[in-house]
Image (cartoon, helix red, strand yellow):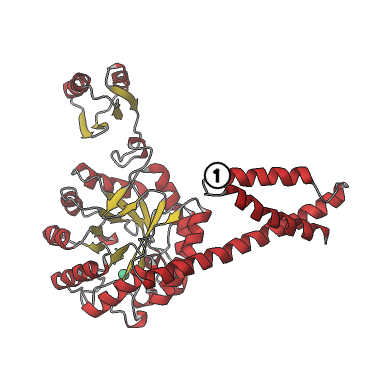
Amino acid sequence: MWIEWTEAEDTEGRGRVREALVATGARFFELPRGLCIVERAAPWMESLAQIRGVRAVTALRTPYKLAARTVRPEGTTVRIGEVVVGGRELVVTAGPCSVETPEQMREAAASVRSSGARLLRAGAYKPRTSPWAFQGLGAQGLEILYAAGQASGLPTVTEVMSVEDVERVAEHADVLQVGARNAQNFPLLTALGKIDRPVLLKRGPAMTLDELLLAADYVLAGGNPRVMLCERGLRSWDPATRNLLDLAAVAALKARTHLPVWVDPSHGVGRRELVAPLARAAVAVGADGLLIEVHPRPEASWTDADQALGLEGFAALMRGLSLDCALHGRALSTAAVRDEGDLEHQRRRIDALDAALVRLLAARVEIGQAVGVGKRHLGHPIHAPERERAVLGHVERAARGLADPTAIVRAFEAVIRETRGAQEA
Ligand code: PEP
Ligand code: MN
């Protein structure tokens, strides 16, 4: 059960609610905006809504509590430096699977930054299936990652595998990642609840969404509200892809939780040629963030070489993503232009969007042709001035946020002429 306070702070009313709950042995958890009953909730508690200072009492029928969407229907945004995750903007995090050398990290960081990544990723502590495989550079890797983050100006994301390492990793990185294999390491989750750093919690390869949200509750219950979730693929029977990327989970999670949801298509598919299409699909299903493995020399990557994008492959993906975001009511989070490289990158994004605008116009003309055939069939005149005026009216309303809606309407007059021409032809 979720008891939400009114905006006006009513100390006495809140005190009465607490007393009533304590008297019944209910266990509850306090958040700034209300109080979440996590044990022994009972139907009579709905009457607490009568107490002054209580805005509403809502039943929480899910096993997870603090992560439930009901607790924050408007969604949580997580700030990492200048970057905000969970709002209208899609945030892309990119970088190598593992920290290898200072040069590799510097090169990767500078390049992904100029391509539009807002955060830099790389693992120093690597969870490897084989004990004989490269295990990551550990503390030395953290130093290298830290330096690459400083040099590029990108906040960093890196995995922490054990409770003993939490403090050191938190000192060197901006976001602490819990890897898929550790997603139910409860002591680790509890320790991450105590730190002042955002946590990126990956879904384990066999975890239900309830289990994932309960894992998030461990961190939230520790007092750390900055939790983000990440879908990275489930274990499946088909070796054609490394994992089975569960994009349905993204849409489902967005409905169930207020926490931001990321997608990691790199581990999800495990093959570089499939990363871009799945990244775009992730935007379509509502992802707030993407985690992408990028390496200056992908084939030579010490870990996960098959799934790493090259620097140019990543840049191309980023150019396309602006359009995917726009089509789904989002915007690609973008840093301020700082140098010639940034300027060049932004211009290429504009070129990609312009090309897409023309493709949209072509799609419009195609529909217009079908309408023309229909008009003839129904015996209507091809030229319909009233309808054209209505279309321009819609455009004008849609363009209201822009500086000069009239100019946009004029541009659409040309579009209408093009469509009419196609109908008359
Ligand atoms: C990673 O992101 O480096 C990683 C190891 O991913 P996962 O835990 O999803 O396998
Ligand atoms: Mn990897």
| Residue 149 locus on image (x, y percent) | 24, 67
Query: Taking 5 as reference, is 103 above or below it?
Result: below
Q: Is residue 333 left or right of residue 322?
A: left
Task: Give the residue at x 61% y 45%.
Answer: 396
Task: Give the residue at x 24% y 80%.
Answer: 103
Task: Report whether the residue tagged 1 is closer than 8 Å to ligand 1.
Answer: no
Q: Determine the residue located farthest toward the bottom in the rendered image.
A: 300
**Neighbours of disc 1 within 10 Å: few (<14), some (14-19), many (20+):** few
| Residue 16 locus on image (x, y percent) | 20, 19
Query: Taking 28 as reference, is 126 above or below it?
Result: below
Amino acid type for the residue under numbered disc 1: Arg
| Residue 391 locus on image (x, y percent) | 69, 46
Query: Taking 50 as reference, is 126 above or below it?
Result: below
Whether residue 373 appears in this view of the structure is yes
Number of marks in picture: 1
At mark 1, the secondary structure is: loop
Whether residue 276 appears in this view of the structure is no
- Residue on which disc 1 sits: 400
| Residue 134 locus on image (x, y percent) | 22, 77
354 or 169, nearer to the observer:
354
Query: Which of the 4 image quadrants contains residue 71?
Result: top left
Q: Quadrant of ligand 1?
A: bottom left
For the C terminus, which image quadrant? Answer: bottom right
Query: Which of the 4 image quadrants contains residue 360?
Result: bottom right
